[in-house]
Image (spheres, rainbow, N blue to C red):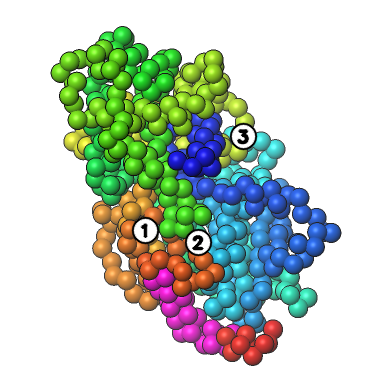
Amino acid sequence: MHLLVALQLLTAVTALHHIGAFHPQHHAQRQRPDEDQALLFQTSNDASLDADPIKQAWHTLPLDHFNDSSTTFRARYWFDNQFYVAGGPVYILNGGETSGAGRLPFMRTGILRLMSEATGGSSIILEHRAYGKSLIGPDWKPANLKYLTTAQALADVAHFAQHANLSLPSGSVLSLSSVEHRITIGGSYAGAQSAFLRRLYPDIFFGAIASSAVTHAQVDFWQYMETIRLRGPKQCIQSIVDTVAFVDSMLDLERSDLTRRLQRVFGLENVTVPADFVNVLTTPLNYWQAANWDSTVGLDVFASFCSRLTSTDSAVPDALTSSLLPSYAAHASFNALGAYAAWIREYVTAVCPEGADQDACFGTYDDRAYQKDGPWRAWLWQVCTEWGYHIAAAPLNVTSLLSRRITLAYVSKSCQQSFGRDVPMWPNISRVNAYGDYGLSYDRLAFIDGQFDAWVEATPHASVAPPRNDTDEQPFWLIPRGGHHYDENGLLNRSAEPSQIKSVHARELAFIKKWLAEDGGIYEAASALRNSGGT
C-alpha cells in the first residue's frame, strides 16, 4: 500500500474514533481540506482570486424558518458565472453533511461544470447549515443543534433560491428571484434534499438531479454491509465472513486466555470490551464507499485490503495456532485471519500511540469522550433525531460481514452518550419518509444511482422499492457497477471518462436540455446567445 494512502487511512481512522469509534461514517463524504485551506488564505489582494471564475460569498438566512424570530446566520456559498448567458438556468448544488469546500471539484470539472457549460447556466454550491463555516451557533450543543433539522435545511435552499444575488462577469447582478429555471442537484443526503426540494417547492425549483439520494430513512440500516457482501469480490468477501465468524466463535467460548491471545494477534490485547475489539475489525469495510472511478478522487483502500486478504503468503503465527483449539488448526480461514490481523496492526492499531491506553483509543464506553464539542456532532445529531442509519450486523438468518456483537444497541448508544435526553431514544424517521420514501417521484426529478453503492438500498433503486421506468420526464438511471454518487465528479476531457460515466453524463445532458427546450425554448435561446458571444 502506498504511504500516501496509508496516511490518509490513518487520518480517517482517527477521525472515526471521535464520532463513536469505527462504525461507518453515515453518509460522510471525503473532502479535500486543501480546498478549504486555500480559501482561508485568499485575500482581496490575491491575484489568483480575481483570476478564478469561482467566487465565494455569504447569504443571510433565518435561523428558524417556521417561527417568528429575527435571529439569522450566514451561509457560505460559491458561484461560477463564466458560462452564464441571459435566460440560462441556475444549478444549485446542495453541500450536504460536510464542508461545502469539499464539493468544489464538482464545480471545477464535475456535474456543475458539465451542465452550466452545455446550457449557458450559472452554477452554485450552497453550504449546509451547521457544516463547514455556515455555523448556526458558537458550538455544537443541543441548544443550537435543535435548529439542525431536515425541514429547516430544505427551507434554507428555498430561501436562498428566491433571495440571493450573484455578480456577473459583465458587472451586472443576477437576481435568483428572476431566474425561471432553477435546478437543484445533490448526492447522498444532499441528493435526498434535492429530491425533497422538487416535491416541496415545485414553484421554486424547475427540476432536480438526485444522485444516490437516500430518500428512505431507517433506524438499523444493516443493508449497507449486505450490499458490500453481495457485490464485493467473492473470495475476499468469503474470507471476511470466515474470519469474522471464527473470531465470534472464539469469543463465544468466553475463555479470557483465548480472547486475549486472539486480540493480541490484531495488536488489540488491551481493549477491554469484546464488542469494541470486533468493532475495530469493521474499519476496512468502511472504505468500500470511498472508491471512485477516478483514482485521483477515490481511495483504493478496500481493494488493497482484499488483495492482501486473499494472498497466500499470510499465515497465523504458530503461537496462536497452538493456543487455540486444535480442531481449528487446518481451518481455511486461518490464512485470511493472519492477513486481516496484519492489516489491522499496520493501519489501525498503529494509530494508538505506544504505551497509550487502548480503551482510550478504541473503546466506546467512556461517556466523557462523547461530551466533547466539535463539528462531528452535527451529522450525529441528524442521525439520532431523524435519519437513523445505524449499521449493525445482519439479521440472524442472513450471513453477516460484521460480528454478531455489533448490535443495534451497540452502534446507537453514541446518541445517548452524546446528547442524553435531548434526543429521542430512536430517531423519528417518519419525518424523513413523509417526503416520499422509496416511492418519491415528480416530473423533472431524476434519480441517478450506483449498482454497487452501499447506500443503494436506501434509494428509490432499492430492491424493495416500487419498480419504475426510465423516462425523460422522470429519469431513473442505475450506473452499472457504479458507486456512491459516481456521476457528480468528472473530467474536463470528457472522452477520457469510463464508458458508464460518459453514458450517464450524456443521459443527464439529454434530459436537462429536453426539459429546458420543452419549457419555451429557453435552452436554444441561451445556446444561440452563448455561441454568438452575447452576454
Q: Measuring from the top left, give residue 389's x and y in whole percent.
A: 40, 41
Q: Residue 489 carries which label?
A: 2
Q: Nearer the viewer, residue 181 or 6?
A: 6
Kind of element beneath mark 3: loop
> How far apart in space, not on screen, are marks 3 and 1 (Cα)?
33 Å
- Identify the amino acid type marked 3: Gly
Q: Nearer the viewer, residue 395 or 502?
A: 502
Res 235 → quadrant? top left
Q: Quadrant of the C terminus?
A: bottom right
Residue at image x 23%, y 30%? 333
Point out the tag, 3 or 1, that comes first from the N-terminus.
Answer: 3
Kind of element beneath mark 2: loop
Residue at image x 63%, y 38%? 144
Q: Residue 306 carries which label?
A: none
Taking the image as drawn, is residue 201 in sight? no
Give the vertical position of 476 relative to 424 (above or below).
below
- Identify the amino acid type marked 2: Asn
> Which SS type dominates the magenta stretch?
helix
Location of mark 1 (residue): 482
The range drawn in magenta is 502-526
Q: Is residue 381 shown left or right of residue 48?
A: left
Label 2: how many Cα within 10 Å (few below 14, some 14–19, many 20+): many
Location of mark 3 (residue): 374
Label 2 vs label 3, nearer the camera: 2
> Pointer 3 and pointer 1: residues touching (CB < 8 Å)?
no
> How far apart in space, not on screen, are marks 2 and 3 (Cα)?
29 Å
Q: Measuring from the top left, give residue 531's x and y in whole percent.
A: 61, 88
Res 498 → quadrant? bottom left
Q: Is residue 359 shown left or right of residue 281?
A: right
